[in-house]
Image (cartoon, rainbow, N blue to C red):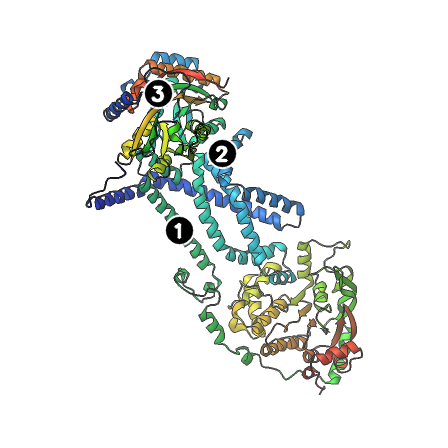
């Protein structure tokens, strides 16, 4: 009398047929399908609420105030560390004891939201921290307030990187919504178990509800892929990546992709025809003297007095005095770590310092009338109004914006220009740096030299009174250096722009700078007319540096 | 799944005659279930008097928390899953009709029935729950039914289990979380040990269907529960399951109401008496194929 009697062979197809028809019956049963609605409601509440809570939590964690971030951390520990099922029961059965009696769907949604929040917050935080710091600095240098930075630079890039994680989170929230069954929400899982209890068709029912869940989660994946495609920067770039490329069996390298490389490569030295190399700029001694005399009568553009700054025990600026007059080009020379970059960053107050003063156009940038430091927002506005442009070693272009938008965007957001005016100005500047044909290219599709030229155009766009260039060619391949130097040279000669350039290009400094300042250990140890210092350094340190900088970079004789 | 606290009447524990009755009743279900239930309404005059005496719930809609996984007592209607059916459902509605309230249902896991009531998320629990002193700490009970448990085993009863006794030593028992059978089986552990036998193990699930599946999948050897539930499982899988025996356990089934509403408790008790007087209770037992011997005159069970 042991176990199941053997079925006659012909019964098996009949059995399978019966199971199949039961499966289809349950698959199309309105009772189960209606359960989907509640499943989606709880999921939506959980995700939506989780997003709002997560934004708050992430904000608190990234905040400057330690108390806020401690509270957020405690919340995360509690809600990430306890099972969702307990949180559901708590929201449903415990909250009523303190007078909060939520309907079951809301209680379940609340518990799910509280549970999702720390996970979403971590995603948001990772997304924000993942945005290149250099771009944030560049935005600050352009006078963007923290809000504009977040909204225009950080968020658009962070969101793009967060979509896959958010898709994951949505799927997991959908599945977690099944736990709402413990608090009597008639969602899909609860309906399935009740149905199984009343009919004993256990497997047909669970296969049917499993398939329904699969359809739901698959829809989330499709939505995720669609959003990824929609926000794909290369799509906007006209370099069509097809939606189909996202299918799992396609092997398109979404990071680099061949057509794009080809598109960049088809323009081997595209700039050269437009940016004709001027003969190595040649000022005669008399011209130099005349220029120096003119500049000497000009107003002071930038002045630092006794500037000191330390990173912990290490002194980076040791009482530095520098005066730059309007129209003057000053080259800062010196070994790495001599304080060149720090000096430049102090001039537009991207960094603070310990003592001393910095004046730009006679104003103490970053300090109110009472001498107190301004808030980040006021500082940003002052930067924009004083007009200090900055060009960075690593270009720091906004990666999600086209070349033209890199220039036009800040004009609109910071300086309130209309879109038409900003675009016109951007086009004009791109033309000037020889890149009008790449106006719609993304930074990552430009060569290093092209990126730096866009960065220069971006810094020039608001008509700054001073342009700071921090080793503008150090990150470039040797063959790309000249195209950038050429642009800078023209700014000096044609535009008479006041510039402070930190550089290792001795020859370039000789050609372009009116004056060089040689830094060592956070002090200027020698300064004077460029050609004079470079040809006949008086300080032995300067001499040694210049000779190390290699023979072929020594200045040419002035013609 | 829960039985009453009072000592009960003769002969109930004999498995054999009892089974016959169950069988007869099961056949009767088919006939009665289709017919409209004439005796549903309790005496109108008496109920009118009750509604006058207990006016607070007249015209209200109350929430009944149930664990709808017990065929015969409470499940969804397979033909119209938006409805619940079963003896408890009908009994609750008969009481509601007498007192003038309607019921909506909130399906929860068995272990959450009383917490849901205590949290105020439900007004009443009529869900085949056994009234025990322990549970009476969480709610007041109006008992209304005796309970007989059946021992569900795989076809052929390979482990030879014949009750909650030493035959369960070394067996795996499937139970619902929170069921009274759980402590009864747990109590066997020291006894089995003393006798030098292996201990019984308990697997806790959160509904009937999962307990039954545990036996079908060979994970558990037995599932002890209300005999009608066991019978319906055997009916659904006649080739794979059988009922080893029926046993009595010393509880009654009760309607749970909040502890802080003695007036409501009294009203429900009074209405239940009227429903029984009108013959509705007995009628419903027959309608749902339950053993008429389950019938019990109501009592109140509280913690003190």
Observer-nearest residue: A479 or A367? Answer: A479
Image mark for residue A92? 2
Observer-nearest residue: B215 or A130? Answer: B215
How far across and how far down the image is residue B57, in percent? 43, 20
Residue placed under numbered mark 3 in the picture: B94
Cα gap from disc 3 to disc 1, whole angstroms = 46 Å
Marks 1 and 2 on same chain: yes
How far across and how far down the image is residue A37, in percent? 39, 41
Q: Quadrant of residue A420?
A: bottom right
Marks 2 and 3 on same chain: no
* Of the image marks 1 and 2, the number of the one nearer the N terminus: 2
Cα gap from disc 2 to disc 3, whole angstroms = 29 Å
Q: Residues within 10 Å of mark 2 (few under 14, many from 20)?
A: many
Q: To which chain does the residue with label 3 belong?
A: B
Observer-nearest residue: A210 or A56? Answer: A210
Residue placed under numbered mark 1 in the picture: A219
Q: Is residue A472 left or right of residue B63?
A: right
Marks 3 and 1 on same chain: no
Label 2 element class: helix
């Amino acid at each position: 009398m042991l176990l199941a009697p053997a079925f006659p062979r012909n019964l098996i197809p009949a059995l399978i047929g019966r199971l199949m028809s039961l499966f289809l019956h349950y698959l199309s049963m309105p009772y189960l399908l209606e359960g989907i609605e509640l499943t989606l409601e709880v999921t939506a509440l959980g995700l939506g609420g989780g997003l709002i809570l997560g934004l708050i939590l992430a904000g608190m964690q990234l905040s400057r105030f330690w108390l806020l971030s401690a509270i957020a951390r405690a919340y995360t520990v509690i809600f990430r560390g306890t099972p969702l099922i307990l949180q559901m029961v708590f929201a449903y059965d415990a909250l009523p004891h303190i007078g909060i009696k939520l309907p079951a769907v809301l209680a379940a949604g609340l518990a799910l939201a509280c549970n999702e929040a720390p996970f979403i917050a971590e995603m948001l935080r990772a997304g924000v921290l993942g945005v290149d710091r250099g771009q944030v600095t560049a935005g600050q240098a352009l006078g963007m307030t923290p809000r504009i930075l977040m909204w225009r630079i950080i968020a658009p890039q962070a969101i793009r990187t967060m979509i896959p994680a958010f898709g994951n989170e949505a799927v997991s929230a959908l599945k977690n919504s099944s736990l709402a069954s413990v608090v009597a929400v008639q969602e899909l899982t609860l309906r399935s178990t009740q149905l199984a209890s009343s009919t004993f068709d256990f497997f047909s029912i669970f296969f049917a509800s499993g398939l329904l869940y699969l359809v739901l989660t698959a829809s989330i994946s499709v939505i995720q892929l669609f959003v990824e495609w929609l926000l794909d920067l290369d799509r906007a770039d006209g370099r069509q990546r097809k939606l189909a490329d996202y299918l799992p069996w396609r092997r398109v390298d979404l990071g680099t992709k061949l057509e794009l490389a080809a598109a960049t490569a088809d323009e081997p030295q595209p700039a050269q025809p437009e940016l004709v190399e001027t003969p190595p700029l040649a000022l005669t001694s008399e011209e130099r003297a005349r220029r120096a005399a003119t500049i000497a009568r000009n107003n002071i553009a930038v002045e630092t007095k006794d500037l000191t700054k330390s990173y912990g025990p290490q002194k980076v600026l040791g009482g530095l005095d520098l005066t730059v007059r309007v129209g003057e080009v000053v080259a800062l020379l010196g070994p790495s770590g001599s304080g060149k970059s720090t000096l430049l960053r102090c001039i537009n107050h991207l960094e603070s310092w310990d003592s001393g003063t910095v004046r730009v156009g006679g104003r103490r940038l970053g300090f109110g009338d009472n001498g107190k430091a301004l808030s980040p927002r006021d500082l940003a506005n002052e930067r924009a109004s004083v007009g200090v442009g900055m060009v960075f070693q690593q270009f720091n272009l906004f990666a999600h914006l086209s070349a033209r938008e890199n220039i036009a965007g800040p004009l609109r957001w910071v300086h309130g220009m209309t879109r038409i005016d900003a675009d016109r100005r951007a086009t004009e500047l791109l033309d000037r740096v020889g890149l009008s044909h790449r106006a719609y290219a993304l930074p990552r599709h430009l060569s290093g030299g092209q990126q730096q030229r866009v960065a220069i155009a971006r810094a020039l766009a608001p008509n700054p009174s001073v342009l700071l260039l921090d080793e503008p060619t150090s990150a470039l391949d040797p063959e790309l250096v000249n195209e950038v130097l050429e642009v800078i040279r023209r700014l000096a000669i044609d535009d008479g722009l006041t510039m402070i350039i930190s550089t290792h290009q001795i020859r370039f400094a000789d050609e372009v700078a009116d004056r060089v300042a040689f830094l060592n250990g956070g002090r200027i140890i020698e300064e004077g007319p460029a050609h004079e210092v470079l040809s006949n350094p008086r300080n032995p340190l300067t001499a040694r540096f210049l000779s190390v900088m290699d023979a072929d970079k020594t200045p040419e004789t002035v013609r | 799944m829960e039985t009453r606290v009072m000592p009960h009447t003769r002969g109930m524990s004999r498995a054999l005659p009892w089974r016959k009755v169950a069988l007869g009743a099961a056949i009767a279900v088919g006939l009665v279930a289709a017919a409209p239930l004439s005796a549903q309404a309790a005496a109108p005059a008496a109920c009118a008097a009750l509604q006058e005496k207990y006016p607070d719930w007249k015209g209200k809609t109350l929430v009944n928390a149930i664990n709808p996984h017990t065929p015969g007592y409470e499940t969804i209607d397979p033909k119209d899953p938006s409805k619940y059916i079963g003896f408890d459902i009908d009994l609750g509605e008969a009481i509601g009709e007498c007192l003038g309230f309607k019921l909506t249902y909130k399906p929860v896991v068995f272990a959450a029935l009383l917490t849901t009531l205590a949290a105020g998320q439900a007004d009443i629990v009529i869900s085949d729950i056994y009234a025990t002193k322990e549970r009476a700490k969480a709610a007041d009970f109006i008992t209304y039914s005796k309970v007989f448990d059946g021992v569900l085993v795989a076809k052929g009863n390979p482990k030879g289990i014949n009750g909650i006794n030493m035959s369960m030593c070394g067996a795996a028992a499937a139970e619902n979380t929170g069921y009274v059978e759980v402590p009864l089986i747990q109590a066997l552990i020291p006894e089995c040990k003393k006798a030098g036998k292996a201990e019984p193990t308990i697997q806790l699930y959160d509904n009937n269907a999962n307990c039954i599946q545990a036996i079908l999948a060979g994970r558990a050897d037995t599932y002890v529960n209300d005999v009608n539930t066991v019978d319906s499982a055997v009916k659904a899988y006649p080739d794979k399951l059988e009922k080893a025996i029926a046993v009595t356990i010393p509880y009654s089934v009760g309607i749970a109401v909040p502890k802080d509403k003695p007036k409501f408790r009294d009203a429900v008790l009074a209405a239940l008496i009227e429903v029984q007087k009108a013959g509705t209770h007995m009628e419903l037992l027959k309608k749902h194929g339950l053993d008429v011997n389950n019938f019990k005159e109501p009592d109140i069970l509280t913690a003190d």
